[in-house]
Image (tube, rainbow, N blue to C red):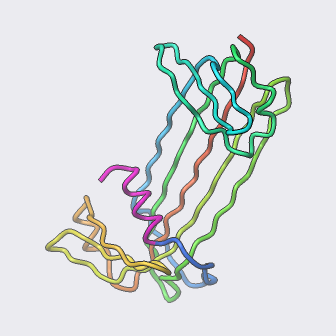
Amino acid sequence: MSYKHIVAAAVAALLAAPVVAEVDLQSQPVVAEAMETTIEGEVMVVNTDTRLMTLKTAEGEYKVLHVPPEVERLDQIKIGDMVSITETTTALIELQTGRDAGAMGAEGDTAVDAAPGEKPAGSITDTLTLYGKVVGVDKAAGTVTIKGAETTRVFPVEDKALLDELKVGDGVVARFRNVISGEVTVK
């Protein structure tokens, strides 16, 4: 299962209501993933109404980007400017045991850090923590069933030895962090 599938599945399974206070828990990291992508190019088109920007990369490819509303100085980006954008996504999935394991819900936050300067620069950081509970373990099929506040989903487990450690009632916590940083420079 690819990283994007893990993230999408975990989000779908666990997204829901506010989380209950955690008291007597022990956490064990199960999966940690990180992925980074960078795009650099010359600005060919900037549409401040639709918040779309087209870049031409060094390879001659055109990339159309949606500029999020958190970027406040879009009108200062001009045709011919150079743009560098890096997106870093991390995921940490933990297994929780103890009396209070298995709370369900979600917590999230977005932080914007604008860097001063003539052209827009800075970062946008989104964090999301999802909580769920193990409601089934099928060692023969190599799957675990996780219940979130709104849905229950079955996930394949690549490391079959992990199935020996899982038991019904254990809590699952998935922490995601996505950081998009960008800088505009004059060509």
Task: Give x and y (percent) for residue 161.
Answer: 24, 65
Task: Give x and y (percent) for residue 164.
Answer: 25, 74
The residue lying at 58 percent from left, 72 percent from top is 106
Between 83 and 74, the residue placed more toward the observer is 74
Quarter of the rendering occupied by the C terminus: top right
Left or right position of 133 against 162? right
The residue lying at 29 percent from left, 82 percent from top is 136
Q: Which stretch is magenta?
A: 1-13
The residue lying at 74 percent from left, 34 percent from top is 48
The residue lying at 66 percent from left, 49 percent from top is 125
Left or right position of 137 against 185? left
Q: Is residue 144 above or below residue 61?
A: below
Dividing the picture into quarters, in which one does residue 12 lie?
Answer: bottom left
Dividing the picture into quarters, in which one does residue 72 lie?
Answer: top right
Task: Give x and y (percent) for residue 49.
Answer: 73, 38
Left or right position of 169 against 101? left
Between 176 and 53, the residue placed more toward the observer is 53
Residue at the outermost left position: 140
Residue at the outermost front position: 49
Dividing the picture into quarters, in which one does residue 13 lie?
Answer: bottom left
Magenta-highlighted stretch: main secondary structure? helix
Label total for image: 0
Left or right position of 47 against 22? right
Q: Is residue 2 magenta?
A: yes
Q: Is residue 62 above or below residue 128?
A: above
Q: Is residue 28 magenta?
A: no
Residue at the outermost top position: 187
Q: Is residue 64 above or below residue 34?
A: above
Task: Give x and y (percent) for residue 30.
Answer: 39, 62
